[in-house]
Amino acid sequence: MLSVAKTLIRAGLMTILAVPAGAGTLDTVKQRGTLQCGVSENLFGFSERTDQDQWSGFDVDFCRAVAGAIFGDRAKVTFVPLSAGDRFDALRANRVDLLSRNSTWTLEREAGLGLAFAGITYHDGQGFMVMKDLSVTSALELERARICVETGTTSQLNLADYFRTNSMTFEERAFPNAAEALAAFQSGQCNVLTRDQSALFAERLKLSRPNDAIILPDIISKEPLGPVTRADDFSWFTIVKWVNFALVNAEELGISSANADEARTSHKPDVRRFAGLEGGTGRMLGLDDNWALYAVRAAGNYAEIYERNLGVGSRLGIPRGLNQLWSMGGILYAPPIR
């Protein structure tokens, strides 16, 4: 009854009253007092942990935005590092409430594993990194290459598809985690490393001599990355999905972590709804009406999160490309909050 509409029959009329979301994961998170968020083990730009146990990165900031929306406090999140092989099992086993770990949205992962992707936070594609002395400029020159890849990833499947499609042969060197795959690449066990292109930018920084490696321009797949929840709690899925949308809408509306308080004095209807002054959207989610503003205060809008962690001014230096707003030449688009 807490997560579905109550049906009341009064005076011969059927009235449907919406009941605020609150059952399941959201209640568990509130009672615990912290969000448990699954992230990658140590991927520069996405989820990095210092020796002082401080976390930073694109996926980390999304977790903080969700914590902000729920608690009004970005610090109320516990980060759980997970390998590609155990990330989905950890989510299904309730070890984490949310997975924000550069995971590709596929039909098999939703329908087969009973998961739900709450939108796309990063539009990516699989690529290849090689040492310069291999003297290649295209993936089509990788005939008979020894290629390092992480098991349990779409990268492993895409790799086989790409070489079969192009009637090429290769030798796969599969490793249980990203760290071992990178170490094998650096030691020469393989002469190519394949991952999502954004991850390759991050992994190159870990090499002892990053300038000796190049990332080929070829993109061989679609890799829509986004946060994941269990499919058995629609109310929780809806919260995570709309936090994602809120960060994009905030950029469109010009609302940032620096000027979030000013939004509460705006006379624009869409800004007032975002700030929780009109519409009552928080009650629909089981949150405070200021939830969207709290999310932005916690982590910034989408542009702030991207540029801080991945953008051209960061160590990774990745142009926004497809991840630019739809109005700016990209494909980033979010439904309105109303």
Image (tube, rainbow, N blue to C red):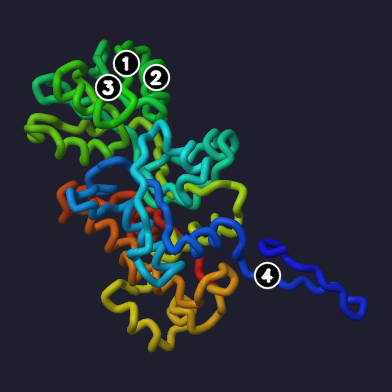
Residue labelled with disc 1: 172
Q: Residue at x 36, y 43 (%)?
A: 102
If the image is split into quadrants, where does the C terminus sit?
Answer: bottom right
Quarter-of-image position of residue 6: bottom right
Q: Quadrant of the N terminus?
A: bottom right
Give the x, y percent position of residue 257.
30, 72
Q: Earlier in the sequence, mark 4 or mark 3?
A: 4
Amino acid at circle 2: Ala
Q: Nearer the viewer, residue 71 or 114?
A: 71
The reply to whether discs 1 and 2 touch (Cβ–Cβ < 8 Å) is yes
Comparing labels 4 and 3, the label whose residue is closer to the camera: 4
Question: Distance of mark 4 from mark 2, alpha carbons?
Answer: 48 Å
Residue named by callout 4: 19
Circle 2 residue:
160
Q: Mark 3 and mark 2: span between their CA atoms?
A: 12 Å
The answer to whether residue 310 shows anywhere in this view is: yes
At 51% from the left and 70% from the top, the residue drawn is: 337
Give the side of residue 313 with respect to residue 21, left or right.
left
In screen coordinates, is 314 left or right of 101? left
**Circle 3: residue type:** Cys
Whichever of labels 3 and 1 marks the residue nearer the N terminus, that label is 3
Indicate which disc residue 148 carries: 3
Q: How many marks?
A: 4
Q: Quick one: label 4 or label 2, which is nearer the N terminus?
A: 4
